[in-house]
Image (cartoon, rainbow, N blue to C red):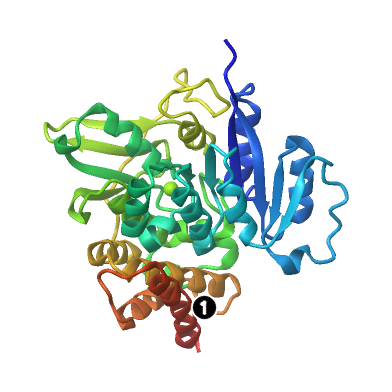
Amino acid sequence: MSLQAKNVAILGSTGSIGVNTREVIRASQGRFHTIAMTAHTQLAELVAQAQQDRPKWVVATSPSAAQGFDFTNLPCETELIVGAEGVERVVTAPEVDIVVAAMVGSAGLRGAWAALNAGKTVALANKETLVMAGPLVMDLCQRRGACLLPVDSEHSAIFQALRAGEKREVRRIVLTASGGPFRRYSKDQLRQVTVEQALNHPNWEMGPKITVDSATMMNKALEIIEARWLFDLPPEQIAVVVHPQSVVHSMVEFIDGSVVAQLSPPDMKLPIQYALSWPERLIGPAARVDWTTTWSLDFEPPDLERFPALLLGYDTARAGGTAGAVLNAANEAAVAAFLDRRLPFHEIVPACRAVLEQHTYDAQPPLSRLLELDAWARQEITKWIA
Ligand code: MG
């Protein structure tokens, strides 16, 4: 019996999730085929990827980066599309089965939205989509009969562990956090953190934005919000525990006291593959636990005083409405300012809280209002820094 390959569109193919997705697809022995790939500015890398994967479409989302770039080495069967509208065109194409939404930041919302609106299966690596617009995205998904599958390793772990029981049997979910490189830093030490230190994550190889988010623990704050909408759980049923080894990717605690965890070495290829192959499991290229050596796993409660981002995450998850979009945009702008050495590390979270508290809250905003507030929050961060 030969299986028809599933056609995958990779949004953000040159980023770390995109690169891992291509590895999973190439190891899949024809189960998956890359039909479209998009990139913003890394166009030489995009062309090199297209030469290997021979997709039907490549999208260069930034017209200014594409202008003057030499695309003559693209395979002759590959169509080049320039501009962000190209993302909408490829994700809605009838040939596309699965969309891997791996663009960084709020830019990823548009592609994920278009794919869900077209009723596609979306493997969501872009947590900002749910942080910004969780209720609207989940509603769209239901109305269009689309399927939203988590790629974020914690949410993939919870998604897998939830198969052990019924929703009404869940007492809470427990998100694990590595604690980042500054887990043991005092408040004073946190005031001295440099860009170089923040970009040096102990367990995961990721892009710069998410690596800084991991160091402030804002990444976990965003994941609380992501989980709140994805699994439809109130913040009181979402706990966080620090687990420095990043082997237990998260857990579900059931009402009888049973805790079901998902374990694997830190390697994004596993959650990516699970989102592509679900509800099946396939043999794949992800790293495996080595049971022949002695090892241990540690857990400790998070320190909310040194890492106030977590409180901000809970407050935002509780508020819902416009709060997620404002927090997300404020954080993106604050992290960019930190990387640009315009904002000290320890002021990223206070800056975000200030902007969140200033905004005009709306409990049931339309998408257009969220996009307005996204732009507004970025400007407010600039003002806050000045
Ligand atoms: Mg994660």
Q: Crowdedness of circle 1 by 10 Å Cα count: few (<14), some, many (20+)?
A: many
Which residue is depicted at the point 71% across and 39% down?
55
Which residue is depicted at the point 85% across and 65% down?
68
Counting from the top left corner in percent of width and height, residue 330 is at: 44, 73
Task: Please say if 162 is above or below 202.
Answer: above
State the image quarter where residue 127 is shown.
bottom left
Residue lying farthest left? Answer: 256
Q: Is residue 253 left or right of residue 321?
A: left
Which residue is depicted at the point 25% across and 49% down?
232
Counting from the top left corner in percent of width and height, residue 83 is at: 68, 62
On the image, numbered disc 1 is attached to which residue? Answer: 343
Residue lying farthest front? Answer: 94
Task: Please say if 187 is above or below 70.
Answer: below
Question: Is residue 159 shown to the viewer in this render?
Answer: yes
Which residue is depicted at the point 45% across and 70% down?
329
Quarter containing the N terminus: top right
Residue situated in front as seen by the camera: 168 or 335 = 168
Residue situated in front as seen by the camera: 259 or 380 = 380
Residue situated in front as seen by the camera: 190 or 69 = 69
Counting from the top left corner in percent of width and height, residue 153 is at: 43, 41
Q: Is residue 147 left or right of residue 47?
A: left
Q: Amino acid at mark 1?
A: Leu
Residue situated in front as seen by the camera: 160 or 280 = 280
Counting from the top left corner in percent of width and height, residue 325 is at: 39, 68
| Disc 1 secondary structure class | loop
Q: Is residue 45 left or right of residue 234?
A: right
Q: How many marks?
A: 1
- The residue carrying mark 1 has its beta carbon less than 8 Å from ligand 1: no
Q: Is residue 181 left or right of residue 103?
A: left
Residue lying farthest top? Answer: 1
Task: Please say if 358 is above or below 201.
Answer: below
Question: Is residue 183 shown to the viewer in this render?
Answer: no
